[in-house]
Image (tube, rainbow, N blue to C red):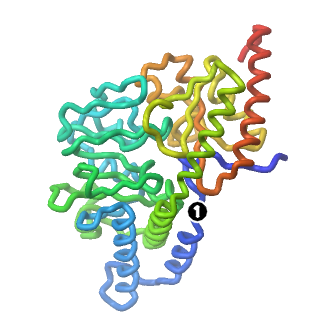
Amino acid sequence: MPARTYLDWNATAPLRPEARAAMGAAMDLVGNPSSVHTEGRAAKGLIETARRQVAAAFGAEGADVIFTSGATEAAALALAGRGLACAGIEHDAVAAWCDPALIVDRHGRVAVPDPARATLQLANSETGVIQNLPEGLAVTDATQAFGKLAVAFNWIGAEMALISAHKLGGPKGVGALVIRRGTDLAARIKGGGQEMGRRAGTENVIGIAGFGAAAEAAAQDLAANVWAEVARLRDILEKGIAESTNMTIFVGKDANRLPNTSCFITPGWKGETQVMVMDLAGFAVSAGSACSSGKVKSSRALGAMGFDAVEAASAIRVSLGPLTTEDDVLRFMEAWTREHEKFRARQRSGALI
């Protein structure tokens, strides 16, 4: 069995040791954060510490940070019933609540004629393409950008932003909706008065503690410029793939992208097949968003960018992180090139691919 190499950081990042330690400490707290006794106040204090950590890391001091079960719940809270316009590149959790009326160009960039009536992601999970957000935007999905880019909610110009813990090394199952203070927003989950009356239910104290610690550590990584090295490795990867074949298309290469993301298309070689053969070779990569209950399907985002059905079904995404090494990248290139040569041989022989 080959050693495993994880190259799917946009699906989920490995749990940071800081988050693990914070969660372990939180497990020892017995109190309900809504209780007024000493134990309850201790649990509440931990939540408020995490809220400050997330706000500071996201440049959202003065905004409301509402903890949720993840970015999907945050999207429902921010978008349900508003009828906002969006583009076809949005994550399914956002697309479920909006009208896909905005036009996407071949490079994955979106123009927004009426920002107050629109939602636009900050960075795409599949292609890594970064958007220039217009001032006055109603909602942005900042899930992939938070922790990888030096962005601040207070200057991106959006009324609300969705973020998630597990994309930056926190635990799965916790996220937040960040809201410009004074924004009117009705709760969807009603009951107690938790989370400033926006989201009822006893808080996930352990997960929230991990989120706060991970956000703080991610901010320290950004300050240390660790993502510049990740971008260097991504460029080595793309250069090596390009030198091995003239068939492959690098999506969004001429646009501003996340430093860790490479989405490339080899027309006719199904993305799901590539994922499987690379998995057998010991590498975890994906064929698009990871939020489809284990299913591999043609990329809706690539279709919105103008790629045809064959091209959209022939893409894979390789996403790196601060723990990725140059050796990891070189071994992936070698394994991918070897499998690509087998694909080309089958293609020349007329075999099914």
Q: How many marks are shown on the rendered structure?
A: 1
* Image coords of residue 62 (percent x, y): 23, 67
Residue at 52% across / 73% down in the picture? 23
Residue extending furthest toward the right: 1
* Image coords of residue 352 (percent x, y): 73, 14
Given residues 237 and 101, the one toward you in this image is 237
Q: Is residue 219 left or right of residue 284?
A: left
Q: What SS does tag 1 mark?
A: loop
Residue at 47% across / 53% down in the picture? 148
Quarter residue 136 falls in: top left
Given residues 295 and 143, the one toward you in this image is 143
Q: Is residue 42 left or right of residue 340?
A: left
* Image coords of residue 159 (percent x, y): 22, 51
* Image coords of residue 200 (percent x, y): 29, 64
Quarter residue 293 falls in: top right
Vertical side of 49 occupied by 122: above or below: above
Residue at 35% across / 26% down in the picture? 104
Vertical side of 244 occupied by 294: above or below: below
Q: Is residue 129 left or right of residue 273?
A: left
Residue type for callout 1: Leu
**How many other residues sit within 10 Å of disc 1, few (<14), some (14-19) or many (≥20)?**
some
Residue at 77% across / 28% down in the picture? 339
Q: Is residue 13 left or right of residue 324?
A: left
Q: Quadrant of the C terminus?
A: top right
Vertical side of 4 occupied by 345: above or below: above
Vertical side of 31 occupied by 94: above or below: above
What residue would you read off at disc 1?
Answer: 15
Quarter residue 350 falls in: top right
